[in-house]
């Protein structure tokens, strides 16, 4: 039986509103299952009345990355930006992990946002260590967070030029302590990595992306964000998609709103906040309304392609768990193809792929 251990690191990150990347060394003594990231400032001053952009403040977190070094080689095992991770958390847990707060009027207000980095197959099982990282086998494990200075594109109009109080980022580790005789050294490796592509075919035609998927292992799922050329996410940017494995259609002409409805049913997504709740200072959140607000989905422009199916290939773990997904072992680039029908030749699609290597 694995004993659970929680600890908030004494080492914090300090974001002073300037663009920078800060590195934190993570512990390397137990099984790493999750990392909670809490960003908080007791005071920030807007330069005037702010009209927030969608995903305002979240866009200031341009990259969250975990790099592992073991046996002489370095590898990025997690890399997602703040907005994508926040919404991916919403899918995983059915509701936002926290409200997003930042000042929208002249005067001091709190800045706050939370994220969870989750190395579990079943995101709702507190005892799932099937892909937990045996950190004691590594020589280095570090978390790198890249912050951007608040601007009109990542915050809103009249963004603060400085913070009255710096943002403190705290990291809490959720870990497992194996008992004597338990061996997790052969745990499969889960990677969560991002790729961005731009459409070059006008609306009405299915455009193929041969390099969309990362192949060679077991793909569990792909979290997709579709946005326009101004980087504003929108459900209107793609009408339908399909996935082909060679000549075999795995998903055929899927209508995006139907896929989003499927996500709501399977992930039991809800807003977590009553409609109209003022979670920003002085205004209703532009991203945290109820699941349907005048026809819009809470995570407009986001949807999940989930390959998990108990009839598909799986990886057996030492603990007897079967990790399901789409096996792409032996695939070459172009063997698994994503096709989408986009609103414009400049539409942007980004995917966050969760892959397990046995």
Image (cartoon, rainbow, N blue to C red):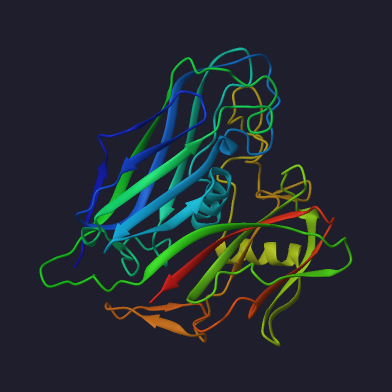
Q: Position of residue 183 (x, y in %)?
A: 19, 72
Q: Is residue 204 above or below residue 8?
A: below
Q: Is residue 101 left or right of residue 55?
A: left
Identify the residue at the far top of this view: 107
Q: Residue at x 70, y 50 (%)?
A: 300
Residue 353 quadrant: bottom right
Q: Is residue 29 left or right of residue 60?
A: left
Q: Is residue 51 above or below residue 65?
A: above
Q: Position of residue 225 (x, y in %)?
A: 66, 55
Q: Is residue 167 left or right of residue 7?
A: right
Q: Residue at x 69, y 63 (%)?
A: 261
Depth check: give the residue in front, 353 or 279: 353
Q: Is residue 252 left or right of residue 2?
A: right
Q: Is residue 113 above or below residue 17?
A: below
Number of marks in picture: 0
Identify the residue at the far left of this view: 180
Q: Position of residue 245 (x, y in %)?
A: 65, 83
- The quarter of the rendered structure image containing the C terminus is bottom left
Q: Is residue 63 above or below residue 178?
A: above
Residue 157 quadrant: top right
Q: Position of residue 343 (x, y in %)?
A: 84, 57
- The quarter of the rendered structure image containing the N terminus is bottom left
């Amino acid at each position: 039986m694995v004993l659970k251990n929680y600890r908030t690191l004494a080492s914090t990150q300090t974001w002073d509103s300037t663009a920078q990347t800060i590195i934190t060394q993570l512990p390397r003594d137990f099984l790493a299952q999750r990392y909670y990231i809490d960003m908080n400032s007791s005071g920030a001053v807007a330069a005037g009345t702010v009209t927030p952009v969608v995903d305002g403040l979240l866009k200031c977190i341009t990259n969250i990355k975990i790099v592992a070094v073991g046996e002489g080689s370095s590898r990025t095992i997690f890399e997602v930006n703040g907005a994508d991770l926040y919404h991916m958390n919403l899918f995983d847990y059915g509701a936002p992990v926290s409200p997003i707060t930042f000042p929208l009027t002249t005067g001091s207000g709190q800045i706050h946002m939370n994220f969870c980095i989750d190395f579990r197959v079943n995101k709702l099982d507190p005892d799932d260590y099937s892909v937990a990282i045996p950190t004691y086998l590594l020589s280095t494990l570090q978390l790198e967070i890249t912050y951007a200075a608040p601007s009109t594109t990542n915050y809103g109009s009249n963004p603060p030029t400085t913070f009255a109080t710096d943002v403190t980022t705290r990291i809490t580790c959720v870990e497992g302590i194996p008992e004597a005789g338990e061996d997790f050294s052969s745990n499969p490796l889960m990677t969560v990595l991002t790729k961005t592509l731009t459409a070059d075919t006008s609306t009405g035609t299915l455009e193929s992306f041969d390099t969309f998927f990362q192949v060679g292992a077991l793909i569990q799922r792909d979290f997709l964000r579709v946005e326009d050329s101004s980087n504003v996410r929108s459900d209107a940017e793609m009408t339908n998609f399909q996935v082909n494995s060679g000549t075999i259609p795995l998903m055929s002409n899927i209508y995006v709103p139907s896929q989003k409805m499927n996500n709501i049913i399977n992930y039991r997504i809800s807003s977590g906040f009553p409609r109209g709740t003022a979670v920003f200072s002085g205004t209703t959140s532009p991203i945290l309304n109820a699941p349907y607000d005048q026809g819009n989905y809470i995570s407009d422009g986001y949807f999940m392609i989930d390959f998990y199916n108990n009839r598909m290939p799986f990886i057996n773990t030492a603990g007897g768990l079967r990790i399901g997904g789409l096996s792409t072992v032996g695939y070459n680039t172009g063997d698994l193809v994503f096709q989408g029908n986009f609103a414009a030749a400049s539409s942007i699609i980004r995917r966050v792929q969760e892959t397990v290597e046995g």
